[in-house]
Amino acid sequence: MSLEANVRQVKETIARAAREVGRDPAEITLVAATKVQTDDTVRAAIAAGITVCGENRVQEMTAHLEADAYAGAALHFIGHLQTNKVNKVVGRVDLIESVGSEHLLEAIEKEAAKLNIVQDILLEVNVGGEESKSGIAPGEVENLARKAREMPHVRLRGLMAIPPVAGPDGNRGFFREMYQLYVDIKRKMDDNKSDIDCLSMGMSGDYADAVREGATLVRVGTALFGARPPMGVKAN
Ligand SMILES: *Cc1c(COP(=O)(O)O)cnc(C)c1O
């Protein structure tokens, strides 16, 4: 199938899942996970109706930015970010979705202060409690959200999660837990709750369920672009 057809189909699936649970499809934004894609494929995705691109790797993102490949779309950073690379991301993206430690949060605040900007961020939650994954534990969300709120150069916009690879029952339990955390943190941060409007969860295999459970951002790669080559192999 063509990229255009895939974009249309994923958007239709999102809209259908939203209506099933009485949500307005306009509440949900499709983020195209563009890792390993070429400049031209990124441009083609935007021409096909993608409004937000999500990048994992600083180096690829920098190359796409230099080629102006994201023109016409917003840009989110969704991958693991090392503190020594924050200067290549802060101020260059609309939203950093993957803030999974206090250390990183502090580095982002420092860099944003240097640039005299306010950087929008999400806190990444390790909802499955997996050793191999970054992100804060669900029980740490409130503490870190309060720290973020005290920082003048970051604006907390919500939460993001990458749940474990789905089992037979899928990830609905984790999505439900994330939605509850999101609602709780919105309520607790009452003085800036209007800023908290993003819950990023759901990928190619499970974005419809994520929408049913309250996602406002879904990050989809494979269902738009096809299977990625194995790590380390360059897409053509
Ligand atoms: C690659 C990636 C996605 C998209 O994964 P697919 O299964 O290809 O849809 C979503 N989120 C993050 C953080 C990713 O790295």
Image: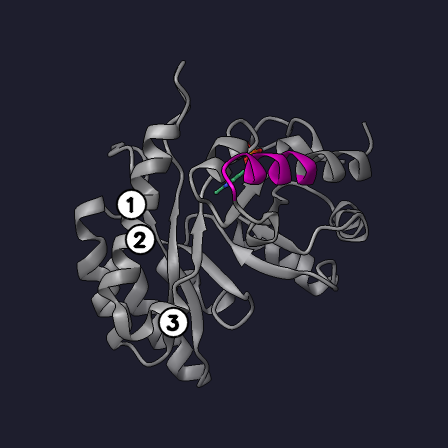
Q: Nearer the viewer, mark 3 or mark 1?
A: 1
- Horizontal placement of 44 versus 187: left or right? right
Q: Which residues are magenta?
A: 11-22
CA separation in Å, label 1 and label 2: 5 Å
Report the Cα–Cα distance between label 3 and label 2. Answer: 17 Å
Percent x, y for residue 209? 48, 31
Between 17 and 115, the one lying in front of the other is: 17
Magenta segment main secondary structure: helix
Among all residues in the image, which is located at the extreme front?
22
* Percent position of residue 104, x then y: 31, 61
Q: Residues within 10 Å of mark 3 (few under 14, many from 20)?
A: many
Inspect the image, locate mark 2, and give the three-letter code of the amino acid beneath it.
Val
Residue that label 1 marks: 180
User: Which element type, helix, strand or loop, lies under badge 3?
Assistant: strand
- Between the C-alphas of marks 3 and 1, the distance is 21 Å
Residue 7 is left or right of residue 126, and the answer is: right
The residue type indicated by label 3 comes to Arg
Nearest to the observer: residue 104 or residue 187: 187
In the rendering, at what x and y percent does residue 150 appear?
A: 24, 76
Q: Is 81 within the magenta?
A: no
Q: Determine which of the numbered discs, if any, sits on residue 235 in the image.
A: none
Say if the magenta span includes residue 18: yes
Residue tagged 3: 155
Residues packed near mark 2 inside 10 Å, few (<14), some (14 to 19) or many (20 plus):
some
Seen from this angle, which residue lies furthest top? 168
Residue pictured at 65% horizontal, 26% vertical: 227
The number of numbered badges drawn on the structure is: 3
